[in-house]
Image (spheres, rainbow, N blue to C red):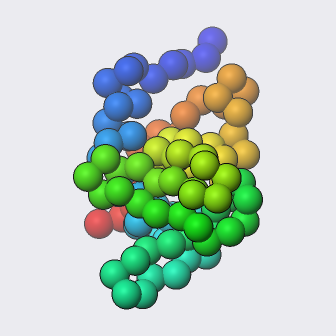
Amino acid sequence: MRKFHSKEFLRKLRNEIPMIPLIKDVLEIPFKDHDDRFRFLCPMCNEFMTGINPNTNLARCFLCEKNFNPIDLVMTVKQYDFLDRPVPSESIIMPPV
């Protein structure tokens, strides 16, 4: 039988896993970091027209208009389907401290 994660656990993953270390160190998505602007290669359209809001812990591609939270980004990059595969545990996607 499949185990589902609680809403609280998913909320914790979404809000507490910082996007920049997730992108750089865990998912190893190509990025540009200069002039106090962090851009990463959008996994949907393959352009660097992205931005991250650290206050909301969300990322957005301004070209294809896709929004990402940490869970969305991991599922998109790793090509996970929410129905086929459970959300990875925190230890899998939490960047090392």
Q: Is residue 24 visible?
A: yes
Q: Nearer the viewer, residue 78 or 66?
A: 66
Residue at 46% over, 47% down:
70
Give how far across and how far down residue 18 sits, in percent.
Answer: 35, 57
Q: Is residue 21 left or right of residue 80?
A: left
Q: Is residue 78 visible?
A: no
Question: Is the residue 31 above or below the residue 80 in the image?
Answer: below
In the rendered image, the quadrant that contains the N terminus is top right
**Extreme-top residue of the structure:** 1
Question: Is the residue 6 above or below the residue 40 in the image?
Answer: above
**Extreme-left residue of the structure:** 55
Q: How many marks?
A: 0
Question: Is the residue 43 above or below the residue 66 in the image?
Answer: below
**Extreme-bottom residue of the structure:** 35
Q: Is residue 71 left or right of residue 43?
A: left
Q: Is residue 45 left or right of residue 91?
A: right
| Quarter where residue 9 is shown | top left
Residue at 41% over, 66% down:
20
In the rendered image, the quadrant that contains the C terminus is bottom left
Give how far across and how far down residue 48 sits, in percent.
Answer: 61, 71
Q: Nearer the viewer, residue 63 or 19?
A: 63
Give how far across and how far down residue 45 sits, in percent.
Answer: 73, 59
Q: Is residue 79 left or right of residue 50?
A: right
Q: Nearer the viewer, residue 27 or 3?
A: 27
Q: Nearer the viewer, residue 91 or 31?
A: 31
| Quarter where residue 14 is shown | top left
